[in-house]
């Protein structure tokens, strides 16, 4: 009951938020919240550390940008094309990486993401170093003009809510329970007859597709697909967001994304603009040393110990 009430209060807050805060900033925050939640699906619940998720996030942006600008697809289909493209990339990379463990898995995902980065740099459909600019926002359902930031905000909110809702449903399903069992003790799960590689691959593809959904939506918001979103720095940022908010929690990645995006937004226009990476690095070190369970994890432990 308390959980449902908290979700209702959060929904009410999100509905009125664009009247209090700049909508474009809120949309960026929502996109990164979905991105971090998608990453948390494989790291927090699957125990798989990927250093290549920027390839899915940024790659979907290019696919969506091309679909909207060159093919002239409706906005919904363009975003769907980006998410499906990211899922197919996840399938290809996952087939190569999923049989490896630990640092070897992480390095394979990083190497494949770097290959994707150089592919996007040299491909003509991406616009190279200039990226894809002037991507049309179009309309939602052919009725609602997405050039209006307020209308676009509620469109983005609906997409991100559906994506995070799918993640929540997944981790609470039998599939999610098996995934957690594999994370905790892979050999025991294998001895019980579960196809470990199949479960890991499915989780990896789902995570890639949802990361792509976030990247495709961000492309529509900013009408831009650039190399920044496919760079390995972006993979590092989503790791930081997830760890800062709380690994293996549903709300943690969104909280972590909110903190990082807010810091980047406000520090970039202040006297510390050149020190943003340093500030984020210090936050990461403090998080690892002082509260390894993240913001949400520490709050949960505090509440549990208080009662």
Image: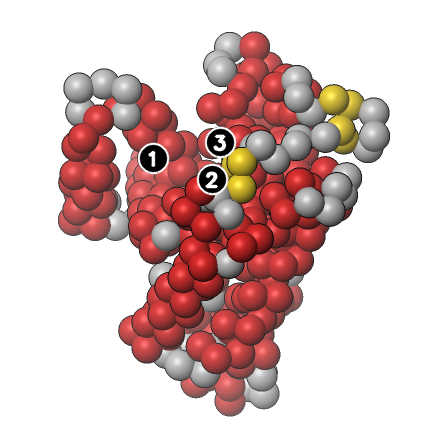
Q: Quadrant of the N terminus?
A: top right
Q: Secondary structure at mark 1?
A: helix
Q: Secondary structure at mark 3?
A: helix
| Pointer 3 local density, CA inside 10 Å: few below 14, some 14–19, many at least 20 | many
Q: Pick whichever, 127 or 265, lies toward us.
A: 127
The quarter of the displayed image where residue 298 is located: top left
Residue, x 26% and y 24% (percent of image)?
267
Q: Position of residue 246 (x, y in %)?
A: 37, 46
Please indicate whether residue 102 sits to the left or right of residue 276 in the image: right
The quarter of the displayed image where residue 165 is located: top right
* Label ID, residue 260: 1
| Pointer 1 local density, CA inside 10 Å: few below 14, some 14–19, many at least 20 | many
The disc, 1 or 2, on the residue closer to the chain's N-terminal end is 2
Contact (CB < 8 A) between labels 1 and 2?
Answer: yes
What is the residue that sits farthest to the front in this orientation?
A: 124
Please indicate whether residue 96 sits to the left or right of residue 304 in the image: right
* Label ID, residue 32: 2
Instruction: Using the numbered discs, state the Cα–Cα distance from disc 1 to disc 2 in whole angstroms.
Output: 9 Å
Q: Pick whichever, 89 or 227, lies toward us.
A: 227
The correct choice, above or below, for 207 with respect to 138 in the image is below
Residue on which disc 3 sits:
28
The correct choice, above or below, for 232 with respect to 224 in the image is below
Instruction: Using the numbered discs, state the Cα–Cα distance from disc 3 to disc 1 in whole angstroms.
Output: 11 Å
Contact (CB < 8 A) between labels 2 and 3?
Answer: yes
| Pointer 2 local density, CA inside 10 Å: few below 14, some 14–19, many at least 20 | many
Residue, x 48% and y 43% (percent of image)?
131
User: From this viewpoint, is residue 238 visible?
Assistant: no
């Amino acid at each position: 009951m308390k959980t449902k009430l908290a979700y209702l209060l959060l929904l009410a807050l999100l509905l009125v938020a664009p009247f209090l805060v700049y909508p474009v900033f809120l949309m960026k925050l929502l996109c990164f919240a979905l991105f971090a939640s998608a990453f948390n699906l494989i790291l927090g619940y699957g125990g798989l550390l990927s250093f290549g998720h920027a390839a899915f996030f940024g790659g979907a942006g290019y696919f969506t940008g091309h679909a909207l600008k060159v093919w002239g697809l409706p906005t919904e289909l363009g975003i769907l094309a980006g998410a499906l493209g990211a899922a197919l990339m996840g399938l290809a990379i996952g087939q190569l990486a999923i049989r490896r463990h630990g640092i070897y898995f992480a390095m394979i995902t990083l190497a494949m993401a770097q290959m994707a980065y150089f592919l996007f740099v040299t491909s003509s459909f991406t616009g190279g170093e200039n990226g894809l600019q002037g991507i049309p926002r179009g309309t939602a359902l052919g009725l609602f003009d997405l050039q209006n930031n307020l209308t676009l905000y509620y469109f983005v909110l609906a997409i991100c809510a559906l994506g995070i809702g799918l993640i929540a449903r997944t981790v609470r399903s039998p599939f999610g329970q098996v995934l957690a069992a594999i994370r905790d003790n892979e050999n025991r799960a294998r001895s019980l007859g579960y196809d470990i590689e199949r479960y890991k691959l499915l989780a990896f593809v789902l995570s890639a597709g949802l990361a792509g959904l976030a990247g495709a939506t961000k492309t529509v918001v900013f009408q831009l697909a650039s190399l920044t979103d496919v760079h390995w720095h972006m993979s590092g940022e989503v790791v930081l967001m997830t760890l800062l908010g709380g690994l293996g929690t549903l709300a943690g990645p969104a909280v972590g994304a909110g903190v990082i995006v807010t810091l980047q937004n406000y520090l970039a226009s202040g006297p510390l603009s050149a020190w943003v990476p340093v500030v984020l690095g210090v936050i990461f070190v403090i998080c690892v040393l002082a509260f390894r369970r993240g913001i949400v994890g520490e709050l949960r432990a505090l509440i549990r110990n208080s009662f």
